[in-house]
Image (spheres, grey):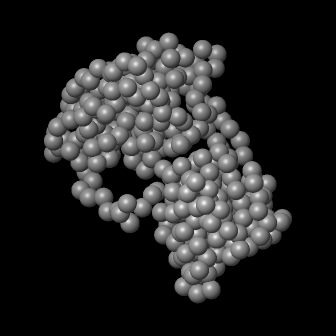
Amino acid sequence: MPDVLVFVEYSEGKPVKAALQALGAGSRLATELGGSAIALVIGGDGGELGKSGAGRVLVASGDAVKAYSPDGYARILANQAAATGAAVVLASATPMGKDFVARAAARAKCGLAADCTELKVEGGKPAAIRPVYAGKALLAVQAPGQLWATLRPNAFAEATTADAAKIEPVTVGFDAGSLMAVVREIVEGVRGKLDVAEAEVVVSGGRGLKDPAGEGKQNWQNLEKLAEAIGAAVGASRAVVDAGWRPHGDQVGQTGKTVSPKLYIACGISGAIQHLAGMSGSKVIVAINKDENAPIFKVADYGIIGTVEEVVPALTEAFSKSLRG
Ligand SMILES: Cc1cc2nc3c(=O)[nH]c(=O)nc-3n(C[C@H](O)[C@H](O)[C@H](O)COP(=O)(O)OP(=O)(O)OC[C@H]3O[C@@H](n4cnc5c(N)ncnc54)[C@H](O)[C@@H]3O)c2cc1C
């Protein structure tokens, strides 16, 4: 069947935004293939997915899935991939998706195209497009059998459908005692803080902002104020994280998080290839740098040559004024 099975991740009883985007992408691909999207929910109730693009919502519940377990989730996803006979299996490339979907694909004896930014149909077969070599090239992946892919958060739009999906329970097929490991607790760094990988707007700081424990104190406060004024998450370059100025969870780039927000504002960041690897998929890029030859300007849609001391507070004021009305 040319159906598309989409794992929909839940957090605190609700589907996460990246999973709704994956479901939207799956629904559009299924329509192109002539099938429909099937959502798989593990540990949630699926009620919120009524009109989010799925024709059916499969729900696995019970004691064995009360806590997240990579082993258990992989078994369920692989079982449902076989049971539905879907042509494509999708999940979002969130930390959870990255943790267990490759194991599920291995169980299904399939490969996995990770962190894809586009889905299409080529020669009548589904294809997943993924950036490689730090975003310098795009790879189109097709599979001889079932195509498995994880999708980059914010690279796809959610969907709305007219008809409510049918919710169907599925059997888990194992008990909690058979799991090799379960996650007992998730400790959040700072509660309520907007994550760079999920945010629609990201304001990132680099070494140009200087040490927040010394002469850069005001610069980092200004960056936080700008982020607050426009509802953005604060990101950072690796130089900043290595120096201990920001936590690793804020790092954008090859060895940090990959972000594709609607707007990315890079402040005092040179634009090294490893940083670009994590943010060049942003819809609009603004760069503020005092060096007109900084490589970040090559990928920027708007470049401001100036110091962060001068430009960041001026931007905050301008945004605040126009947002006030
Ligand atoms: C294997 C590997 C993986 C890596 N992974 C990552 C990664 O995930 N993410 C990442 O970011 N990097 C990564 N790096 C590091 C990367 O190569 C760069 O060293 C790093 O991105 C530089 O950070 P930066 O731009 O903040 O600092 P710098 O390169 O020092 O740039 C600072 C910039 O600030 C500007 N500036 C200075 N003062 C001001 C001012 N007052 N106002 C305005 N502008 C000013 C300067 O002109 C300069 O362009 C990786 C490197 C390796 C080898």
**Quadrant of the rendered structure where residue 257 is?**
bottom right
The residue closer to the viewer here, 230 or 181, is 230
Q: Is residue 150 above or below residue 260?
A: above
Place of residue 62 in the rendered image (x, y in percent of width and height, measured from the top left): 17, 37
- Number of labelled discs? 0
Place of residue 37 in the rendered image (x, y in percent of width and height, measured from the top left): 42, 22
Which quadrant does the C terminus fall into?
bottom right
Q: Residue at x 43, y 17 (%)?
A: 36
Q: Is residue 174 above or below residue 198?
A: above
The residue closer to the viewer here, 283 or 127, is 283
Q: Residue furthest bottom?
A: 214
**Quadrant of the rendered structure where residue 304 is?**
bottom right
Q: Is residue 102 visible?
A: no
Q: Is residue 200 visible?
A: yes
Place of residue 38 in the rendered image (x, y in percent of width and height, measured from the top left): 38, 23
Q: Is residue 199 above or below residue 105?
A: below
Place of residue 220 in the rendered image (x, y in percent of width and height, measured from the top left): 57, 75
Q: Residue furthest right?
A: 293
Which quadrant does the N terminus fall into?
top left
Q: Residue at x 48, y 63 (%)?
A: 249
The residue closer to the viewer here, 104 or 51, is 51
Q: Residue at x 61, y 65 (%)?
A: 316
Left or right: 201 in relation to 9: right
The residue closer to the viewer here, 309 or 207, is 309
Left or right: 81 in relation to 180: right
Q: Residue at x 64, y 31 (%)?
A: 140
Q: Is residue 130 above or below residue 232?
A: above
